[in-house]
Image (cartoon, rainbow, N blue to C red):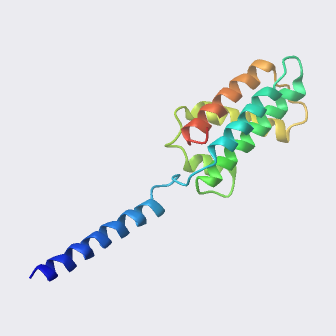
Amino acid sequence: MSDILMVAFLVAILLVGGLILFIMGHGRKGSKPLDVDRFRTSWMTIERQLVKGEEASCHLVVLNADKLLDQALRQRNFKGDTMGERMKSARDTWSNANNVWAAHKLRNRIAHETDVNVGYDNARHALAAYKQALKDVRAI
């Protein structure tokens, strides 16, 4: 009788262990681990690129911050063919969705319009939104 209990106990342990491994491998969306140190280093580089009085730096930091957030969303496996679609997939993740969307819209204006003027304060607000978004997806 004790041999049967021992086998049942071992089978139960294997089943529970297998279930735990399955859950870890196929957990909720966004559970894929990121190289947080690399993202932090990239983020600090972006922040240092913003120079008051240099409009080109304002454009550059917004473009680069958007690109970094897109990398994080891709690596976290948010669905979508475009950044906008991935942002929609992540909508439950954002602590302030309006700020993230405003920053992304500013990025789109910079990328697609020729006469966009982005001031230092606007760039700082966009960076703050991207920074919070990166925190929200646990990239920094």
The number of callouts visible is: 0
- Residue 38 lies in what quarter of the image? top right
Quarter of the picture holding the C terminus: top right
Q: Position of residue 108 (x, y in %)?
A: 77, 40
Residue at 53% from the left image edge and 52% from the top image edge: 30
Residue at 84% from the left image edge and 34% from the top image edge: 60
Q: Position of residue 1 (x, y in %)?
A: 8, 82
Q: Which residue is most to the left? A: 1
Residue at 18% from the left image edge and 76% from the top image edge: 6
Q: Position of residue 49 (x, y in %)?
A: 82, 28
In this rendering, would 18 be left or right of 124?
Answer: left
In this rendering, would 132 be left or right of 29?
Answer: right
- Residue 81 lies in what quarter of the image? bottom right
Is residue 33 visible to the viewer in this orientation of the structure? yes
Residue at 78% from the left image edge and 33% from the top image edge: 45
Please determine whether, in this image, residue 107 is positioned above or below residue 89: above
Is residue 26 visible to the viewer in this orientation of the structure? no
Which of 21 and 128 lies nearest the eye of the viewer? 21
Please determine whether, in this image, residue 39 is positioned above or below residue 29: above
Which of 1 and 92 lies nearest the eye of the viewer? 1
